[in-house]
Amino acid sequence: MKVTLNRRISVGPPRTHRWYSGLAGMRVTKMMRADQSKFNADERMRGFTLMEIMVVASLILIISAISIPKLIQFWQDWQLRSAAAEVADLTQQARMGAARTNSIYPIRFQTNGGLQQVYIDQNRDGALNATEPYIDLPQSITGASGAPNGSGGQPSAYTLVGDTSSGTPFDNSNVIAYSQRGLPCNYSSSVCATPAASYFVFYFSDSRTNDWAAVLVTKSGRSKVLQWNGGAWK
């Protein structure tokens, strides 16, 4: 009696064939990685195309065309306000000096070498002397001849809210001075009568932009810088 055993015989590639296949796959993978690295290096060394440079240059020109005029306007506004702030500081210097020396200190304007100067006339001779404090206004900024009237591109005159003075506010057509008590007055004929009939507003304009700034001096002697924003004094 014969007994036959059924066996499953798995048929596949020899072990050596599998090893060679794995080795070939590793080589292919290394070659692909090497090619990718070379491609990345070539991309980094490639630089910019003419089209890319033109796009970037166009963006720079567009941004410059938008931002540069605004920067110039900001600079001019800042310069105008800074000039007014210097005049306000000079008024306070005159106020404290008059009270300290028990004297009258007028503030005057003059033009020297094309520049307008503002100075404290400590000896009241109507001229700027070497020892007297002064400031030079920027070439494009000058004090107005009087209060603006709101026509011809000018702003309206400033009105101090809450002021109960009955007189007309003093402006650039008047000479402000500080008394021995440090109070402002309308200086006329060597007389400084206090308290003043009203407050003082000195106006300044920039010929480049026709923008306006002002220095307010209250009847008590306090100073404040104002600037016209196209619709109101701020």
Image (cartoon, helix red, strand yellow):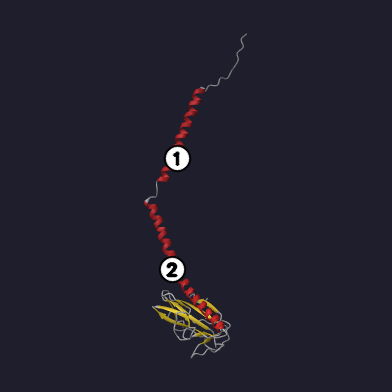
Image: 208 above or below 44: below
Left or right: 96 as drawn, with respect to 138 = right
Please give the residue where the numbered disc 2 appears in the rendered image. Answer: 72
Q: Nearer the viewer, residue 15 or 93?
A: 93
The answer to which quarter of the image holds residue 110 is: bottom left
Residue 57 lies, in percent from the top left, at: 39, 57
The answer to whether residue 13 shows anywhere in this view is no
Q: Which mark is residue 37?
A: 1
First-in-chain label (1 vs 2)? 1
Left or right: 52 as drawn, with respect to 171 = left
Please tell me which residue is depicted at 42% across the width and 45% down the height of the picture.
43
Image: 107 above or below 25: below
How many numbered circles does the render carry? 2
> Quadrant location of the N terminus?
top right
Q: Are marks 1 and 2 in contact (CB under 8 Å)?
A: no
Q: For numbered disc 2, what is the local secondary structure?
A: helix
Q: Nearer the viewer, residue 222 or 132?
A: 132
Alpha-carbon neighbours of circle 1 within 10 Å: few (<14), some, or many (≥20)? few
Q: For numbered disc 1, what is the local secondary structure?
A: helix
Kind of residue sitting beneath label 2: Ile
The answer to which quarter of the image holds residue 38 is: top left
Kind of residue sitting beneath label 1: Ser
Residue 16 lies, in percent from the top left, at: 50, 23
The answer to whether residue 214 shows anywhere in this view is yes
Mark 1 vs mark 2: in front: 2
Residue 69 lies, in percent from the top left, at: 43, 67
